[in-house]
Amino acid sequence: MIIKRFKTIITLIALSSSFCMGQAPKKPMAQLINDEFKFAVDQYKVLANNIPAGLTPQSYANGKSINHDIKWWCSGFYSGSLWYLYEQTKDASIKKEAEEALKVIEPNQTYTGNHDLGFMMYCSFGNAYRLTGKPEYKAVVQRSAESLASRYRPSIKSIQSWDKNRYWQCPVIIDNMMNLEMMNWVSDHGGSPKYKEIAISHSNTTLKNHFRDDFSSFHVIDYNLETGAIIKKATWQGAANCSAWSRGQGWALYGFTMMYRFTKDATYLKQAKGIAHFILNHPNLPADKIPFWDFDAQGIPFTKRDASAGALIASALLELGQFTSGQEKEEFKSAAETMIYSLASPAYRAKLGENGGFLLMHSTGAYPLNSEIDVPLVYADYYYLEALLRYKKWYL
Ligand code: GLY
């Protein structure tokens, strides 16, 4: 027991201080990005062999691949990652696999059972359209936006995240900001303006109700659908109602940065910067800048990390840097660099053929639900690849 605890301490110290001690891979970023994509193409060929027909990959635990049906919120990340791989490498077999993966999830375009259509259909078909220009892919994105719009509730001026159940009446979670990219995009590309109006209305409600004075976010706001009143401010995946669940802070950062991209509303930029400073100045952010699963988790520094939060925050900071200047821009870029170097290091990045074919280790899905703790997660890979591509596009 004492030896096990000692080993944990040593591992944590190594994770947190590897950069100060010069142990991290300090190859030039251009080379790192090339190497990571080359590795990812080979690794995703391993992953492809672990996916039963009709399912989409999610994780890998206890030597077993975990795959889900297409209604699971993560069903679009696999094809999205494949499109990112294709974008960088032009590997024909990856493109073929990406096209096949799209066919699996295409029926989701008329799904209205949750708010995750943006994750599912924009990360996948949105990227496919961006890279191929095929009108049939655009049509799927447009249809998906219409499905998502069916969950907009005028009484609360938000898109309802989950259906009513024994815990919630009309829950809206901070993650929902991520689904707005698709809505903005469709309006800006020939679709009805109503999708962008929904995105703006939802963002303004989120701005009003989800945040605390320090720019940290609650996870779930539950509303009374008749009156529009707030019933409670709570969490589902965080450590406590009053805590800052790390991935939620990442969704908020990414979401408000993206909303600024589409609207140029300075309120959104101010919010995104505030969230970024909350994250980067937090005393519980480790030296390698990969957050623990909750900034207020009990047991820090002996609790689990969330590499998915690190990857998505890195990607968001790179975009936020595009809208800032001087020292602030440098701060966001430098933090994202540290995150990328951390994720690319052996502390987080798997070896070829291991980790069920996923790229990154050490993500945490839902710690309080005892679900997906310290495992690979398909969306960690997606945002990692996105961060690498964004770095290459904007900073090299
Ligand atoms: N959107 C669900 C999650 O972040 O776990």
Image (cartoon, helix red, strand yellow):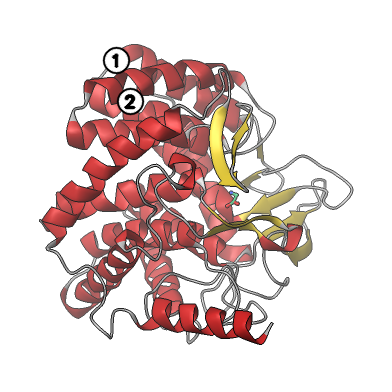
Q: Taking 196 as reference, is 61 above or below it? A: below
Q: Is residue 188 visible to us here?
A: no
Decide: few, some or many residues near mark 2? Use Cα within 10 Å; few <14, some 14-19, many ≥20: many
| Residue 80, x across and y down, in percent | 39, 34
Q: Secondary structure at mark 2?
A: helix
Q: CA distance from mark 2 to mark 1?
A: 8 Å
As helix, strand or loop, the secondary structure at mark 1 comes to loop
Does residue 84 lie above or below 301 as drawn? above
x and y percentages locating residue 113 in the rendered image? 70, 30
Disc 2 designates what residue? 128
Question: Label 2 is placed on what type of residue?
Answer: Ala
What residue sits 53% from the left and 40% below the top?
198
In the displayed structure image, the side of residue 300 where residue 131 appears, left or right: left
Residue 159's x, y, as percent?
63, 42
Specify the amino acid type for callout 1.
Lys
Numbered badge on residue 134: 1
Q: Earlier in the sequence, mark 2 or mark 1?
A: 2
What residue appears at the point 22 percent right and 41 percent down from the top-left corner? 38
**Labels in figure, total:** 2
Q: Which quadrant of the structure image shows residue 321?
A: bottom left
